[in-house]
Structures are given as C-alpha cells and as structure tokens.
Image (tube, helix red, strand yellow):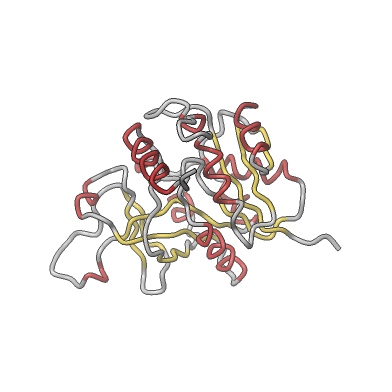
Amino acid sequence: MTLSEHLVVVPARRAATRLPQKLLLAESGKPLLAHTLERCLLSEKADCVLAAVDCEELAEVARAVGAKAVLTDPNLPSGSDRVHAAVQAYGKSVQGIVNVQGDEPEMDPLAIDALFDSLDSGAEVVTLCAPLPSKSLLDDPAAVKVVRDLDGQALFFSRSPTPFQQNCPDSSDPMLHIGLYGYTPEALAQFSNWAPTPLELKEGLEQLRFLEHGKTIQVLKWGQAFPGIDTREDYDAFLLRFQHDAPST
C-alpha cells in the first residue's frame, strides 16, 4: 500500500515586477529562495519540500539546500496553478498540499504544520490571517485583508479597506491575510480546472476563485504575519534582521 504524503510546494518564478530576479538575490550569503526553502524543511509534518520553478537556476538553488525541484511552465497564470502542475509532476500519492510563496524567508515552519493539521481534520482549503500590525495598512492595496464568519471561514478577501469601519468591537476588525495555503489534491485540481473568475481578476487575488465557486476556505488565526519580500526596501530590511540574528563567529 502506497502511503499518501504531506507535500510542501514553493512556486518560484524568476521574473518579478517590483524587484527583478528577487529569488536569486544573495546578499545574505545565499539566494532568497534558499532561505524560504530552508524554513519549509524545518516543518515536522512535511514529507517533502518541492520547488516549482520556471528555470534551471532556481532548481539548482532548491537542490543545494536539500529540497526537490520540478520545472513548470513560465506562463501558468497563478501560483496555485504552478503548485498543481508540480503536484502532477511529482507522481506520488499526496494527502495534503501546502503552498508557500518563494519570497517568505522568515515564514514560521509551525504555520505549515498547522495547515496540514487542518487538512487532516477535514478542511478542503485553508489559509492564515493575523492582526493588522498597523491601521495604515487598511489603505495599502499590497496588504490583503480578509473578513471571516463566526466559524472562521472566509467571507471575502480584498485589497481595499473592508469591512466598513463603524462603532464596532475590535473582534470585527479586518485581519491581514497571510498568503500560505493548504489544499486537498481534489480542491487544488478543481481550482486549476476553473478559469479565472471576475472578482479574482478585479482584485488580483487568486483565492477568490474558490469563493466565487462556492468553495469554503478555512482561515486560521496566527499570532503575527511574516514579512514577505516585494520591494528593494523589504529585502534591505530582511538583510538587517538576518545580520542581527546571525551568530557571531
């Protein structure tokens, strides 16, 4: 009998709009992608960490740190589509899949384990949220907000301030979405078979494809968000934190 695996997939494209070739930046001593993959490899529940890359240079980065790599079509429309292609190429029986973005070098490996636990408990799609670290992020379109129902299911994701703020308890405040996802293989296959949906295209948020098709997304509350790398300023701030935390020799 073939055992099903917990698979972490890290979609990684060489191209990047705001910070060109950011996953190959190595001013810390190793490529940015390597930092993210090393965090993923610390997960206790992951059976395999697989980089879904679009060039051999990124594949070499993955193999150098002990992850696996698979080449995927550079023209795939979303990270989740790239994850699905990688799962198909992986060729083994998979029980649960966690998608970690390649630009998350400070991601908490315990978050991966929490997503796998949720999938093992019956969730089809699961992601994370955290308190907004600053009210100024309400108006920042780069900070994706999520509103949950009373059972912790996603009601909506948006780049705009949502919900409208009236006199309401803090528990009604919007949460910051953390872009890690867990899926069952069946849910991910459905996603890949659906065409991009109207709200997904309008907001530029692929997870809305699930909601527009009536698929439930469980949203787990996490203590704090992980600082991803989108801009040169983000990368410079990461370098400062990394150098501060690095052991002295």
Instruction: Work out whether residue 14 can be spotted.
Output: yes
**Quarter of image, res 154:** bottom left
Instruction: Work out whether residue 198 can be spotted.
Output: no
Classify 5 as above or below 29: below
Residue furthest right as drawn: 1
Is residue 3 found left or right of 233 in the rendered image? right
Is residue 61 found left or right of 226 in the rendered image? right
Where residue 246 appears, as percent x and y from the top left, is 45, 46
Of residue 149 and residue 3, the one placed in the foreground of this image is 3
Residue shown at 36%/57% (left/top)? 156
Residue shown at 54%/62% (left/top)? 115
**Quarter of image, res 223:** bottom left
Classify 180 as above or below 239: below
Where residue 167 appears, as percent x and y from the top left, is 13, 69
Where residue 109 appears, as percent x and y from the top left, is 53, 57
Which quadrant would the N terminus be assigned to in this image?
bottom right
Residue shown at 26%/48% (left/top)? 160
Where residue 58 appears, as percent x and y from the top left, is 60, 31
Of residue 227 and residue 208, the one placed in the foreground of this image is 227
Residue furthest front as drawn: 249
Residue shown at 70%/44% (left/top)? 88
Classify 175 as above or below 100: below
Classify 97 as above or below 202: below
Of residue 155 and residue 169, the one placed in the foreground of this image is 169
How many labels were placed on the picture?
0
